[in-house]
Image: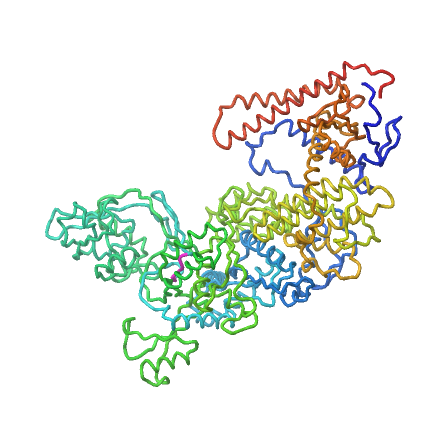
């Protein structure tokens, strides 16, 4: 090798013996050695082994596409669980005087903090007025009240993660924040749970108890079991003001519900009428639209239904003949999927222009079961091209038929009772039979009478009660209804005018469509648990039926009696009032939550200060049934919108894109991800549920496949961070436990970074104010600029409420800027004793600002680490990170150097090139000399400023600059950085050419084999072909690098070093 002028190189200063014969120059380059004793030899060897395995895997091009997700994911090695065992009373501050454990352990980190936050009042708006950064602005939200019956699933966890991040950010910014917790009484669900428990434990049915006795049992159950949701919310770190917790059956909330009903009635927006409602025969109650699931059937489908001993067939079209009266051989054939409703038919309808039936207009038909005469009517709503073009009209059991019958003044016949059995109108031969048993009996009768005309597969959509699994019936019931057209029009106008903002904006179309087609809302429910309707029937004489009924509405019975006296002209004391036994739809009370939770109808300070809410955040599936109704009732009852902004997140699905469902075994309790759980425990939860044997078998098999070793402990912070890292405002969110586990690894990175920083700062370090911290080196300037940029990105993400922008910025800063680059580059500097002061101030700033940026998303980890930072002089720092000032882009603007960041990106490219060369020649331990050469004077100066970190990060020895035009050293490995810049690495004496050529040949053979295999594939389309082309390009590039490396090695073999060469 030819001699190189000594001036080309910069001598290492720390940790390397300079090459023999080279004088020591100014400190411009370094060799990074392990820092202190904290990195043991064993850890280094393990790390090197992992790097070699990773490199081998990449070179082998392992094909993961044939493996299941469980197989292809990184195996989880159980980590040592470290517990916080220092005696600490609930609400007492955690002891942070001990050293940090060597590794991140969620149970240790999350212990004790939450109860201290609550006791100190950090979550109360009254506390926030005292903060130095107080803005005087308010920010208020309410949690979507979960059902008191159940426990939170991963979808709820997404809601909490998003809301809490926003709440904590506003609190740290100095806003007066109120986040109201609460739960919903969930009428149908709670009553069903308690009824099941009473039967299981005491063998007692609800109707064997009085209403008062049953309600006592429900309240008893609520007190015993209803606290689970609060425990889950606290485990998730939700910073709610628990002193303002609200339950929709609380006395104050019940007053609000009664007041809302009375005001709506007085405004003419509530009325009672006999009308078709969604009816669950299993529950014996009307149910809301949201509790009706539309199940599409492709054709014949057998379903197991409650109350039926054998499966029932659906998706079949039965053809029935209706004889024409007076014409023995004439008939009209009608198709129906519901032969059990035949006894309720009052007519047959055809389209007026259907030529097949024009000659029968005005004729009478014989009912195929009863023989009664039915009119053949014409109506333009009938679709002549569907089926035979003739439809039977059953107004008591079909909304479409009810509208048609009303146009033709036809009276309905109710043939299905509340319990799903046939009524007396069907005749003795059917009365009392279950409707689906009656179906088969009717079919047999049609065959016997010769009026059965066939059966065929028929795609259809079947309405199913989500609460009971029963087929929903449409029954005529006297119920209370809310008139929605006027209120709905105002809700639509609010969005159209911009007064109400829906985000993402694509939900506006659905909103406008729903409100333009909105019908009246049935709010009666035939339950005992709930808000009993404040309406009273005036019992007078022998009047029966709704036509003669006199109903009055009042806040109390005394008020109702006074109104009844005025209506009847009789003394109130002589009147008998019967209160409506029904309760209100749960959605009615939950629609009042934004203002009733703040004390409405009383003029409370909370209502005056925090209403309307600043933001409503919830799942997009609740847009219409909850958000829409809140807007309608809030505007009507308070005179203003309950909130001006609505943020809607997507539905959480599993990693395969499936909806979370108990029958699929993929519903996850957030605590199982936080604390970890064995497969046996997961399976036991399924067995304790309400799945039938078939569903249980499917669910347990799915769990065994998805979680063969259970779920590892991930921690709250990792779960929150993973949930927020998705762009939750777009399409559905597919979440896997492996993603959460990856976030736990990120937590461990932050943990280790702070252990390093705290160790470097020592006990006597005194931090400077952030505005006084000034970088003393290009590396210090770069990391502070990146920190300021991260603060800017976080601020942008919070303002736009796009949390994925924030998680990306924080992940990139902590992992790729601080841990991977700055800490590695600064280790040699800190190996000097005493430590130079400037990097220490920079390290403190990175820790302090970085943790405060992180706090809204990872509150436990941020608090644990921030509390251990040295206090600033004067003792003026906040008591907790959750009330410390959030870093703003403006406050850190003096650190921003975008041009420097751009320059350093070229240095990072050089680092990658050097590491790639080292990997190619397998220089695991050697620290080769390196030269950079650029034909651009500006780039030459750029690299000169960063030679020291470049050598450290590239794991190289002496770094030097080769002047433009000077010939490259012979036999040195070369890699281009750009058209103008090359990097050269010394190989002679570090590599055995003979040995490495054989290794390169073996690696090349493997890569060539993979390339040939991919080339042999038949080109496909779409994403698969794109991936194939990308892999082809990658393999070809790797082969080119290997060929170039082999060429260099041959040059080395041919060279004969002289005695005077280096």
Residue 192 x, y percent position in the rendering: 46, 61
Q: Nearer the viewer, residue 407 or 955?
A: 955
Which residue shows up at 86% across the image and 27% down it? 19
* Front residue (pair 831, 1020): 831
| Residue 566: percent from left, percent from top | 34, 82
Count every numbered label the image shows and give the total.
0
Where, by quadrant of the figure, is residue 562 drawn? Answer: bottom left
The C terminus lies in which quarter of the figure? top right
Question: Looking at the image, which residue is at 50% across and 33% down?
Answer: 1023
The percent position of residue 1005, horizontal first and vertical second, equals: 64, 20
Residue 164 forms part of the magenta stretch: no
Say if 92 sits above or below 835 in the image: below
Location of residue 429 (image quadrant): bottom left
Please identify the quadrant where the N terminus is shown: top right
1062 and 178: which is toward the camera: 1062
> Residue 1052 appears in which quarter of the rendering?
top right
* Residue 872 left/right relative to 572: right
Q: Which residues are magenta?
A: 284-289
Compared to 207, does 649 lie above or below?
above
The colouring scheme, among rainbow, by chain, secondary structure or one colour, is rainbow
Instruction: Farthest residue to the front: give it.
Output: 937
Report whether 479 appears left or right of 175: left
The answer to whether residue 219 is above or below residue 228 is below
Q: Position of residue 950 (x, y in %)?
A: 75, 34
């Amino acid at each position: 090798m030819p001699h190189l002028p000594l001036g080309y190189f910069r001598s290492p200063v720390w940790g390397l013996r300079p090459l023999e014969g080279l004088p020591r120059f100014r400190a411009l380059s370094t060799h990074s050695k392990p820092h202190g004793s904290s990195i043991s030899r064993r850890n280094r060897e393990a790390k090197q082994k992992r790097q070699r395995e990773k490199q081998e895997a990449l070179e082998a091009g392992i094909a993961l596409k044939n493996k299941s997700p469980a197989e292809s994911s990184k195996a989880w090695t159980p980590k040592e669980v470290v517990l916080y065992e220092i005696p600490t009373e609930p609400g007492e501050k955690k002891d942070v005087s001990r050293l940090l454990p060597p590794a991140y352990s969620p149970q240790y980190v999350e212990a004790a903090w939450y109860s201290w936050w609550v006791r100190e009042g950090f979550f109360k708006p009254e506390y926030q007025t005292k903060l130095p950064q107080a803005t005087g602005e308010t920010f208020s939200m309410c949690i979507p009240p979960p059902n008191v019956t159940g426990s939170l699933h991963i979808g709820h966890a997404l809601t909490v993660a998003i809301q809490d991040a926003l709440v904590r950010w506003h609190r740290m910014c100095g806003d007066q924040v109120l986040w109201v917790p609460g739960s919903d009484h969930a009428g149908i669900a709670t009553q069903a749970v308690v009824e099941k428990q009473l039967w299981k434990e005491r063998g007692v049915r609800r109707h064997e108890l009085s209403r008062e006795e049953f309600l006592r049992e429900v309240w008893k159950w609520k007190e015993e079991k209803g606290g689970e949701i609060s425990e889950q919310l606290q485990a998730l770190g939700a910073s709610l003001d628990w002193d303002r917790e609200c339950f929709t059956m609380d006395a104050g909330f019940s007053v609000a519900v009664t007041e809302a009903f009375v005001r709506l009635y007085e405004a003419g927006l509530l009325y009672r009428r006999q009308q078709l409602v969604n009816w669950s025969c299993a529950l014996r109650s009307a149910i809301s639209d949201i509790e009706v699931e539309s199940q599409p059937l492709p054709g014949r489908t057998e379903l197991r239904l409650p109350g039926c001993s054998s499966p029932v067939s659906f998706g079949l079209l039965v053809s029935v003949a209706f004889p024409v009266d007076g014409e023995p051989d004439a008939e009209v054939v009608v198709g129906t999927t519901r032969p059990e409703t035949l006894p309720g038919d009052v007519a047959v309808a055809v389209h007026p222009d259907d030529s097949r039936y024009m000659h029968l207009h005005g004729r009478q038909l014989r009912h195929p079961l009863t023989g009664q005469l039915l009119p053949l009517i014409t109506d333009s709503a009938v679709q002549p091209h569907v089926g035979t073009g003739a439809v039977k009209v059953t107004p008591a059991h079909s909304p479409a038929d009810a509208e048609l019958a009303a146009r033709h003044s036809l009276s309905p016949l109710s043939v299905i009772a509340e319990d799903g059995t046939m009524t007396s109108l069907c005749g003795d031969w059917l009365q009392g039979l279950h409707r689906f048993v009656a179906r088969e009996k009717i079919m047999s009768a049609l065959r016997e009478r010769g009026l059965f005309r066939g059966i065929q597969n028929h795609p259809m959509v079947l309405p199913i009660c989500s609460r009971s699994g029963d087929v929903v019936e449409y029954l005529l019931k006297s119920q209370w209804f809310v008139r929605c057209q006027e209120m709905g029009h105002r809700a639509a106008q609010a969005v159209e005018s911009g007064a109400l903002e829906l985000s993402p904006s694509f939900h506006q179309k659905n909103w406008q469509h729903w409100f333009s087609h909105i019908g009246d809302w049935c709010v009666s429910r035939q339950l005992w648990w709930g808000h009993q309707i404040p309406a009273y029937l005036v019992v007078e004489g022998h009047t029966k039926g709704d036509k003669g009924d006199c109903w009055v509405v009042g806040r109390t019975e005394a008020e109702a009696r006074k109104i009844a006296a005025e209506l009847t002209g009789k003394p109130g004391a002589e009147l008998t009032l019967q209160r409506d036994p029904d309760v209100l739809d749960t959605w009615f009370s939950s629609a009042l939550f934004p203002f009733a939770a703040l004390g409405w109808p009383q003029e409370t300070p909370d209502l005056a200060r925090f209403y309307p809410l600043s933001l409503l955040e919830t799942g997009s599936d609740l847009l219409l049934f909850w958000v829409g109704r809140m807007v309608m009732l809030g505007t009507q009852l308070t005179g203003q919108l309950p909130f001006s902004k609505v943020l809607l997140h997507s539905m959480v699905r599993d990693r395969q894109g499936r909806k979370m469902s108990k029958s699929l075994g993929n519903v996850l309790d957030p605590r199982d991800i936080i604390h970890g759980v064995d497969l046996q425990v997961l399976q036991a939860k399924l067995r304790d549920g309400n799945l039938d044997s078939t569903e249980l078998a499917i669910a347990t098999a799915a769990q065994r496949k998805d979680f063969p070793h259970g779920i590892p402990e991930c921690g709250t912070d990792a779960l929150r961070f993973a949930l927020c890292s998705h762009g939750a405002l777009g399409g559905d969110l597919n979440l896997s436990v492996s993603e959460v586990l990856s976030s736990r690894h990120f937590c461990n990175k932050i943990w280790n970074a702070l252990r390093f920083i705290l160790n470097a700062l020592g006990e006597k370090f005194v931090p400077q104010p952030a505005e006084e911290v000034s970088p003393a080196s290009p590396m210090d300037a770069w990391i502070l600029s990146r920190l300021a940029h991260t603060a800017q990105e976080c601020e942008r993400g919070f303002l736009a409420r796009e949390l994925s922008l924030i998680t990306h910025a924080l992940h990139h800063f902590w992992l790729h800027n601080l841990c991977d680059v700055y800490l590695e580059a600064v280790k040699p500097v800190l190996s000097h004793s005493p430590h130079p002061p400037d990097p220490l101030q920079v390290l403190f700033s990175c820790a302090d600002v970085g943790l405060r940026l992180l706090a809204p998303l990872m509150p436990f980890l941020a608090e644990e680490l921030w509390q251990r930072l040295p206090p600033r002089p004067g003792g003026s720092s906040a008591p907790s990170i959750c009330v410390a000032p959030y870093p703003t882009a403006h406050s850190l603007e003096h650190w921003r150097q975008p041009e420097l960041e751009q320059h350093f990106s070229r240095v990072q490219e050089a680092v990658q090139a050097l590491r790639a060369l080292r990997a190619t020649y397998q220089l695991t331990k050697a620290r080769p000399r390196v030269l950079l050469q650029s034909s651009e004077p500006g780039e030459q100066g750029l690299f000169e400023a960063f030679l020291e970190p470049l050598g450290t990060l590239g794991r190289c020895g002496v770094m030097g600059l080769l002047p433009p035009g000077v010939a490259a050293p012979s036999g040195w490995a070369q890699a281009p950085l750009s058209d103008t810049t090359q990097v050269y690495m010394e190989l002679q004496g570090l590599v055995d050419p003979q040995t490495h050529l054989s290794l390169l040949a073996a690696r090349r053979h493997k890569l060539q084999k993979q390339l040939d295999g991919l080339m042999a594939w038949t080109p496909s389309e779409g994403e698969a072909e794109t991936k194939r082309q990308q892999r082809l390009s990658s393999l070809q590039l790797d082969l080119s690098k290997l060929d170039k490396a082999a060429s260099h090695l041959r040059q080395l073999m041919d060279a004969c070093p002289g005695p005077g060469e280096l």
